[in-house]
Amino acid sequence: MTFLQQLINGLHVGSIYALIALGYTMVYGIIKLINFAHGDIMMLGAFTAFMTLTTFQLPIGVVLLITIIFCAIAGMLIERIAYKPLRNAPRISALITAIGVSFALENLFLILFGASSKPFPYHINLPPLSIGPLQITWITIITLLLSVGIMLMLDFFIKKTKIGKAMRAVSEDEDAAQLMGINTSTTISITFAIGSALGGVGGVLYSIAYPQIQPYMGVMPGLKAFIAAVLGGIGIMPGAMLGGFLMGIIESLTKGYISTLWSDAIVFGILILVLLIKPTGILGKNIREKV
């Protein structure tokens, strides 16, 4: 029964990793950029919710909506200011810029809010749901349902809507998409907006589950979400979901059966194994490039 409890805990944190990993994989799928500032967008979402709750005492649903809008706008601004001028530059330039944006966000919030952790002001004060000896908290249930719901809506959006089809076209061949009349700049900006909104939702859910926020809170979850995206197959949306859930379960089982001290080492060890054995990830396919 301890195994089932750890499995549920893993699905909880894994659903948050999956949301953040979707942001990584959407941006990579469109412009082949690993946006290392994405974990800090999660932190931005957490602080946006924190400020909204403490200043205006709004309902959590309204706070979540405000966080989504704010993070989406922030993602679009970051893309326009930091990444768009480097779109035709070597990939290493954009990668270094992403790391620079990450440091800039962390230090900005360090100046604004200080280094000390702040308690997140929202809690779900309901008794856990008991199924025999299993204890399932309501934040776990809400996080799982919300994450799966968002993933299904995003899948529908990408496959069925005009903007989603434009994203898939730009992902396949940006030049050909441009020749077909697709505004690639707008499509890329919308992709950043959606990815950043997902990161913001992940930040709020993470803060409710682990109610301490600080400027560096997005670093480790962001890295683990990146590993989840690589594990499932970066650039592939179902791969990000699968990788997120697997990453959460592996982390939870490691903490439950081995040691909390080893959990991060094993998670990063998995990244090394994936890159050695199947660099394209579980759902990824090898694509031959003609020279």
Image (cartoon, rainbow, N blue to C red):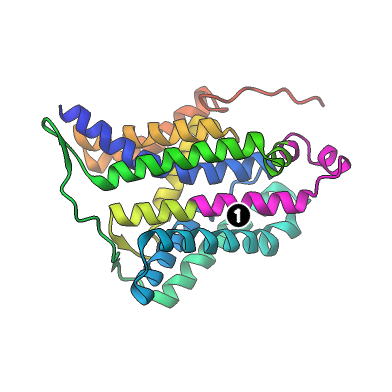
What residue is disc 1 on? Answer: 193
Image vertical order of residue 164 relative to residue 287, above or below: below
- Is 247 within the magenta? no
User: For the stretch drawn in magenta, what is the main secondary structure?
Assistant: helix
Quadrant of the image occupied by residue 284: top right
Q: Residue at x 72, y 22 (%)?
A: 288
Residue 177: within the magenta? yes
Which corner quadrant holds the C terminus?
A: top right
Residue 259 image offset from top left, x and y in percent: 21, 38
Relative height, residue 87 to residue 250 (above, below): below
Q: Which corner quadrant of the image does residue 162 belong to?
A: top right
Front residue of this view, candidates 61 and 3 = 61
221 and 124: which is toward the camera: 124
Residue drawn at x 51%, y 24% is 282
Q: Where residue 80 sits in the image (x, y, percent)?
A: 70, 61
Q: Is mark 1 on a helix, strand or loop?
A: helix
Give the left or right position of residue 170, taking residue 159 as reference: right
For this rendering, which residue is in front, 282 or 99?
282
The amino acid pointed to by label 1 is Ala
Marker count (numbered): 1
Q: Quadrant of the N terminus?
A: top left
Magenta stretch in the rendered image: 169-198
Task: Let me know if residue 4 appears in the view.
Answer: yes
Count neighbours of disc 1 (C-alpha within 10 A) and say few if under 14, some if 14 to 19, many if 20 or more: many
